[in-house]
Amino acid sequence: MLITFEGIDGCGKSTQIEKLKKYFDNKGIGYSVFREPGGTEISERIRSLLLHDTDEMDSVTEILLFSAARSQLIREKVIPLLEKNEIVILDRFYDSTTAYQGFGRNSSSLNDIYTLNKLASHGTVPDLTFYLKIDPKTADQRTKGNKKDRLESAGDDFFKKVATGYDMLASTDKRFRVIDAGRLPDEIHREIVDIIGAYQQ
Ligand code: TYD
């Protein structure tokens, strides 16, 4: 089963993934977690190019690098685990590319992005996608004081556009579950666990 987490920076994704890991641990349920971009040696090297390089990166180069990191992770780690019927949790997947590069940056046509997403994921589609929806202003306040990477420094307008992208995706694809991420972490966690339980039945 493939579960993905999406949302703008500061939506509380990492907190929720940590809580879900503890929940599975307590139940003795096996799982694997990977973050995008990253999760394999090659993908982590691409990640450092994407997040820490200070030089101006061409927007198409950016999409291709995210996709390259993804392709490696999916082929090397995710597909073999899914074939063994394991639970895989992804901290971001191709919906991030659609929302950030497609809507946030307008780097390329959505059709091109969808084609690339399909290629880079080797046709893998999540069973459930949790979209932690939060007002961009609240998210920005949460991340204030954190050291921001290249993409996180992009500004308010950018995150509004990214959020519009997620809203569009969530309204058109049934695998999405929109989670109100403005609530207390434990409340959000309970909702997520309930949704996973109901899905597995
Ligand atoms: P990360 O530090 O993992 O941020 P977060 O904890 O919020 O997920 O950095 C990932 C950054 O890369 C984040 O700002 C979103 C961005 N990103 C894209 O722009 N496109 C993509 O396809 C992916 C996977 C991430």
Image (cartoon, grey):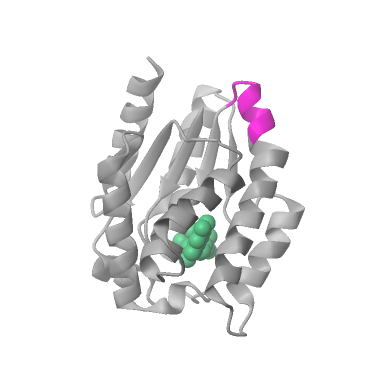
Residue 183 at x, y percent in the picture:
23, 50
Residue 181 at x, y percent in the picture:
28, 51
Q: Is residue 192 above or below residue 111?
A: above
Residue 189 at x, y percent in the picture:
34, 39
Image quadrant assignment for residue 179:
top left
Residue at left 49%, top 35%?
125
Whether 83 is among the magenta residues is yes
Q: Is residue 57 above or below residue 35?
A: below
Which corner quadrant holds the C terminus?
top left
In the image, which residues are magenta?
79-86
Q: Residue furthest right?
A: 41
Q: Residue furthest top?
A: 201
Q: How many marks?
A: 0
Residue 93, visible in the rendered structure: no
Residue at left 64%, top 23%?
83
Q: As drawn, is 92 to the left or to the right of 155?
A: right
Residue 28, visible in the rendered structure: yes
Residue 121 at x, y percent in the picture:
58, 43
For the residue pair 148 and 142, the one nearer the viewer reads as 148
**Secondary structure mainly formed by the magenta segment:** helix
